[in-house]
């Protein structure tokens, strides 16, 4: 897609990002907690994928490492005989600040990031965060801060921890060392151990509004044309990171191609369908199939909601690409929303089962269209 530059995308990573869009309330909560001098030792930052949770975590980590405890920051201000000390009014740390560059480069001694690691023996990224990753935090937190201020740990994402890793982190949460702050990023906090959730202060991030999302897309994807921007904004649902990821994966084009074939049911273009399936099968990483499955499930949910509320094409409905509204209306005529909801569940089981046992992706696509064809024939 024209709006995506892989080299530029490297600078979008949360540890590199100097700005945060749409989360002023959450940022103020962190700043106020720091200024109070009673900063909680653990925060659980929640919200949809791509909404800015890790970006906020790294922004706060830079702030803590640059400023230290609130008392020390105040002591560095004017004396008792001068003006009152002025504390920072935002979490921003300038890009030319030494802490910013060291955090971006992964070279700050008092910051440790826990994420899925690379398995050298298997020559692939691990599917979860393992206990060895958490032990590195225990080792780091057992020592004094290298620069005399805070020690900060970011877990991105806490949902990826296996049972042993979660229990290891719990030990740190139960007995945190002084001036140590843990920032846990979570897309689905309900899946975490209740004992972990209970020891963290929760900070929930909401999807960005239209204005904030637009500002974020201006920075992340400045070369988007109007049609791509409109479509990705709908798919993103207020999460700029999701928009950038889908741009890189060609998600908009993938969904459009799939829905065009759906629109041909009950008599699809068989050669085109097989060519689509062959392309998915050739992708050994499985990324294309995964993106297709996630987007199609998302679109069917959009269809169900719109049809049930009678809002397809009405107020609050933004067309993703030309012809999408007409297709949604046509599919809503095939069967009632409750039947589409049943198909959504069945389709999800089909895709999940196929992924879990590594079934042929092309065959799964053909099975998907066979199921949809039955709906079209009613």
Image (cartoon, rainbow, N blue to C red):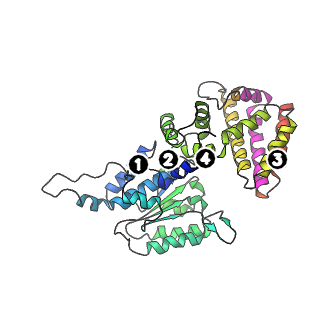
Disc 4 target residue: 245
Pick whichever of labels 1 and 2 is earlier in the sequence: 1
Write down the residue under mark 1: 27
Q: Residues in magenta?
A: 326-355
Which corner quadrant holds the N terminus? top right
Instruction: Please check the rendered image and state whether residue 199 is part of the magenta-colored stretch, yes or no.
Output: no
The residue lying at 54 percent from left, 52 percent from top is: 10
**Pointer 4 or 1: first along the chain:** 1
Q: Position of residue 317 (x, y in %)?
A: 62, 28
In reply to whether residue 341 is colored magenta, the answer given is: yes
Measured in 3D between alpha carbons, the distance from the residue under mark 3 to the one under mark 1, in whole angstroms, is 47 Å
**Viewer-proximal residue among 249 and 180:** 249
Q: Which mark lies nearer to you, 4 or 3?
A: 3
Q: For the residue carrying disc 2, how many other residues have a C-alpha within 10 Å: few (<14), some (14-19), or many (20+)?
A: some
Q: Earlier in the sequence, mark 2 or mark 4?
A: 2
Contact, CB < 8 Å: mark 2 with mark 4? no
Q: Which residue is mark 3?
A: 278
**CA distance separating discs 2 and 4:** 19 Å
């Amino acid at each position: 897609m024209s709006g995506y530059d892989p080299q530029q995308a490297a600078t979008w990573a949360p540890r590199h990002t100097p700005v945060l869009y749409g989360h002023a309330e959450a940022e103020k909560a962190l700043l106020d907690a720091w200024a109070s001098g009673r900063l909680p030792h653990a925060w659980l930052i929640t919200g949809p994928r791509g909404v800015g949770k890790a970006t906020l975590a790294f922004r706060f980590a830079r702030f803590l490492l640059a400023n230290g405890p609130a008392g020390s920051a105040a002591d560095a201000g004017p004396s008792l005989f001068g003006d009152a000390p002025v504390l920072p009014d935002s979490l921003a740390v300038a890009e030319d600040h030494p802490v910013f560059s060291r955090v971006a480069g992964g070279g700050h001694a008092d910051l440790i990031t826990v994420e899925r690691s690379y398995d050298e023996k298997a020559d692939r990224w691990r599917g979860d965060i393992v206990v060895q990753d958490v032990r590195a935090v225990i080792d780091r937190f057992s020592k004094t801060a290298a620069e005399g201020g805070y020690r900060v740990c970011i877990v991105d994402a806490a949902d990826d921890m296996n049972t042993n890793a979660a229990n290891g982190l719990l030990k740190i949460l139960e007995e945190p060392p002084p001036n140590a702050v843990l920032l846990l990023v979570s897309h689905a906090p309900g899946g975490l151990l209740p004992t972990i959730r209970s020891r963290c202060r929760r900070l929930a991030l909401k999807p960005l509004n239209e204005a904030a999302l637009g500002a974020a897309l201006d920075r992340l994807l400045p070369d988007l044309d109007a049609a791509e921007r409109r479509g990705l904004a709908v798919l993103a649902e207020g999460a700029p990171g999701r928009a950038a990821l889908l741009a890189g994966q060609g998600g908009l084009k993938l969904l459009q191609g799939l829905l065009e074939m759906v629109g041909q049911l009950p008599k699809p273009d068989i050669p085109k369908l097989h060519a689509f399936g062959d392309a998915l099968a050739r992708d050994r990483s499985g990324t294309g199939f995964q993106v297709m499955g996630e987007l199609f499930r998302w679109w069917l949910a959009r269809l169900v909601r719109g049809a049930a509320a009678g809002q397809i094409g009405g107020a609050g409905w933004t067309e993703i690409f030309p012809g999408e509204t007409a297709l949604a209306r046509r599919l809503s005529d095939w069967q009632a929303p409750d039947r589409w909801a049943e198909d959504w569940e069945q389709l999800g089981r089909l895709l999940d089962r196929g992924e879990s046992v590594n079934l042929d992706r092309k065959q799964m696509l053909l099975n998907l269209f066979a199921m949809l064809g039955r709906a079209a024939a009613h």
